[in-house]
Amino acid sequence: MAKTKKIKRIKIDADRCNGCRGCEIACSAYHAEPRFSSINPAKSRVQVITHRLRNIWLPVFAGDYAPAECMGRDVYTIDGTEYDECAFCRAACPSRDLFKDPDSGLPLKCDMCEGEDEPWCVKWCLNDVLTYEEVEVPVEEDEPEPLGEVELGLEALANKHGLNKVMETLARMQVAKKA
Ligand code: SF4
Ligand code: SF4
């Protein structure tokens, strides 16, 4: 029997979105330290791409970190308006600040509000734009485990400062903690 895994996904009915940004507020509050202690939409793992004059709103969810920016950029024309493809891209990457923590600069990735029955952005979208579901999908036998938040952060730091510097800093922190 083929191996399967359960994946969580959010379906987006963009036609219903009115750009209220409740999803950004809910996400940033849920991921604040301590939880719900602050609101900062710049720290949200969902960002609403807008074109106010044309009444276009599109929630985009932070995906994987990309250590290098794309070599080429496509341009999409939708309903007469041109959009750089970066507008819809889910990656935190060196070419822009989107999906990076404004304090630390570390990449942000949607974690589907791990541990919650339903993601907070879904709960707080009062226009039923976002629908959460869990589905079984087939997997390749040798498919690697996806990187978690800590691995992603360390990878970003290693790309920026070099692995040796990160290792030295961690070792120093460990010694300081024991002292
Ligand atoms: S699912 Fe959770 S982590 Fe992902 S964007 Fe929504 S609130 Fe943020
Ligand atoms: S909360 Fe819903 S309606 Fe409001 S911006 Fe987010 S997706 Fe759009």
Image (spheres, helix red, strand yellow):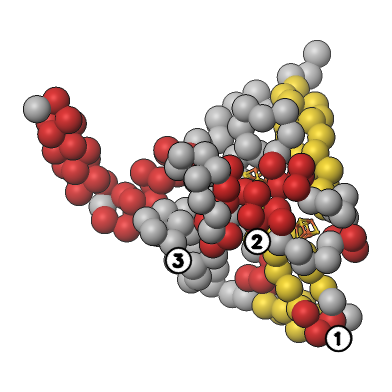
Q: CA distance from mark 3 to mark 1?
A: 29 Å
Q: CA distance from mark 1 to mark 2?
A: 23 Å
For label 1, the crowd category at 10 Å Cα-Cα, with few meaning under 14, some 14 to 19 and many 20 or more, is: few
Badges 3 and 2: C-beta atoms under 8 Å apart?
no
User: Hey, which quadrant is residue 1 in on the image?
Assistant: top right
Q: Position of residue 18 (x, y in %)?
A: 83, 66
**Kind of residue at badge 1:** Gly
- Residue 166 in the image: state x and y as whole percent: 24, 45
Res 23 visible: yes
Which residue is at a point 84% across and 62% down the rendered structure image?
A: 17
Whichever of labels 1 and 2 marks the residue nearer the N terminus, that label is 2
Residue sitting nearer the eye, 33 or 78: 33
Query: The residue tagged with tag 1: helix, strand or loop?
Result: loop
Q: Which mark is residue 47?
A: 2
Could you tell me which quadrant the C terminus lies in?
Answer: top left
Which of the two labelled residues, at mark 3 and mark 1, occupies the earlier sequence position?
A: 1
Q: Along the line of sight, which residue is nearer the eye, 109 or 50?
A: 50
Q: Would you say 106 lies left or right of 84 here?
A: left
Element assignment for label 2: strand
Mark in front: 3 vs 2 = 2
- Name which residue type carries label 2: Gln
Q: How far apart are labels 3 and 2 at the CA level?
A: 17 Å
Numbered label attached to residue 121: none
| Residue at image location 22% in from the left, 38% down from the top | 170
Q: Mark 1 sits on what residue?
A: 80
Residue at the spot of label 3: 94
Q: Label 3's element? A: loop
Up-down: is 156 above or below 97? above
Residue at the image point whose x is 50% and y is 45% from the top? 37
